[in-house]
Image (tube, coloured by chain):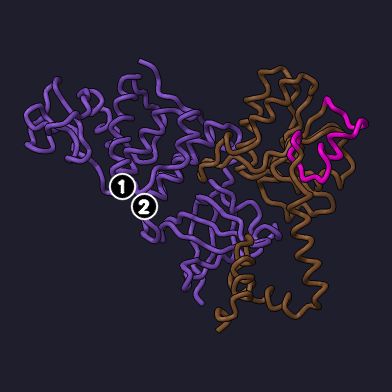
Amino acid sequence: MRILNNPAIIIRHLNYGEADRIVTFFTRDHGLLKGFARGARKSRKRFGAALEPFSEARLYWTEPTGDGLAALKEAELTDLHLGLRQDLDIISLASYACELVEGLIGEGHPHPEAFDLLKALLDHLNHNEPTWEARLLFEIRLITLAGYAPHFLHCSKCGITFSDRGIFFEAELGGSLCPQCLPGRKVLSVSLLTLGSLARSLQTPLTLFEGFRFSSQTTREAHAILEQILSLHLLHPLKSLSLLDRSMPLPSA
Amino acid sequence: MLNSISYFAKLVAELAKFPGVGQKTATRLAFFILTQPQEEAEALADTIRDLKRKVHFCPICFQMTESDPCQICADPRRDRNLLCIVEEPQDVLAIERSHAFKGQYHVLHGALSPLDGVGPEDLKIAELEERLQAGEIKEILIATNFSVKGETTALYLARLIKPRGLRVTRLAHGIPLGSDLEYIDQGTVGRAIEGRQEF
């Protein structure tokens, strides 16, 4: 049977039986996969700490069989991201990022850019404080990579380019809206500054998280916009949000 | 065919509820029980019944016990100023085997897991805070596992307990006794170097 190998980030693992583990991992060229690691808990030699969540490793596996699980053969640890495990707020944000990848990028779809994005965020959090900027940048970039980017700087219905007042947002209708195209229900009111910040952040390199600074108003508005987009496209609410909301409350006005 | 033997099928269904036991293993176990002498099978049934009737979790530390409170909580020779926090009841047994700890325990019955939605309210953390309120405990030894879940729990507990002015310590981590350095993973070696001690 052919053995495949690829750089991967461990998303989560589940103990199975006496000594085995079922591991969810995100590979660069084969997308999100689930694998069975026989004896992973008993023998530390074959896998070591490489199957811990947030670890980056080169994994070796054989293709999934009938049960949909790849058989994990070996792991070479590249980066344990030890810095991530030393702060509760960082763990919360890293867990959220991993769960978001799981939610937006389906199993088995190769997505090298999404892999690079997640790797860059974990590398960033390994050495830096968790910030709202990092969270929002990750969210908007992943939403875009998953193909759900909304219209920001012009009305998603009539296409008019916005001046500075009276801009609204409704993810279900494709993004930003001018006052003439409003639906007959309450929608988010947003500022051009926030939409501009989000649009500009998409022009920056995918893996860059340093050097961004959003005002508290931009942060709150951008969060409301991205939350709306995510709830539209995620099949289930994310479990990691309960801890993240406690760790990173929204900045006050 | 086996489904037509209702008592057998019922036992297979019950055994298959065990963690890590699937239909095949459950069927094998059921066959084994069937081939045992009558008294062996009845002894197993009695033991399961007794376990549920007589063993419960200690109302103070939440360790398994037959007495109320458990032997460790009731033992006057144990240091009441020192409390060790562990994830599961079997972790208490592991620490007791070392004969190195003379304090008391608190079993959380799990670990925080953001990705699985396991939060502080799902663990015995409110009960821990009640114990700390009593004021007898001076030092907390956090002995959760060295996994992401265990570390998350340790960080959460440290954040919760430190403002009370108690001494908070964490189980040391490093190279296992009797092991060769060349086979130890980079994370463990890194932590062992960070936590090196004066010789």
Q: Quadrant of residue B112?
A: top right
| Residue highlighted by disc 1 | A145
Residue B195 appears anywhere in the view: no
Q: Which of the chains is purple?
A: A
Cβ–Cβ under 8 Å for marks 1 and 2: yes
Q: Quadrant of residue B68?
A: top right
Tell which residue pokes out farthest to the right in this image.
B77
Q: CA distance from mark 1 to mark 2?
A: 9 Å
What secondary structure characterizes most of the magenta part? Answer: loop
Q: Which chain hosts label 2? A: A
Q: Position of residue A144 (x, y in %)?
A: 28, 44
Query: In the rendered picture, chain B carries what hue?
Result: brown
Q: Which mark is residue A105?
A: 2
Magenta-tinted stretch: B59-81
Tell which residue pokes out farthest to the bottom in this image.
B1
Position above or below: B28 against A5: below
Position above or below: A253 against B169: above
Depth check: give the residue in front, A242 or A64. Answer: A242
Depth check: give the residue in front, A194 or A189. Answer: A189
Residue B32 appears anywhere in the view: yes
Q: Position of residue B33 (x, y in %)?
A: 73, 75
Q: Residue at x 67, y 57 (%)?
A: A41
Q: Which chain hosts label 1? A: A
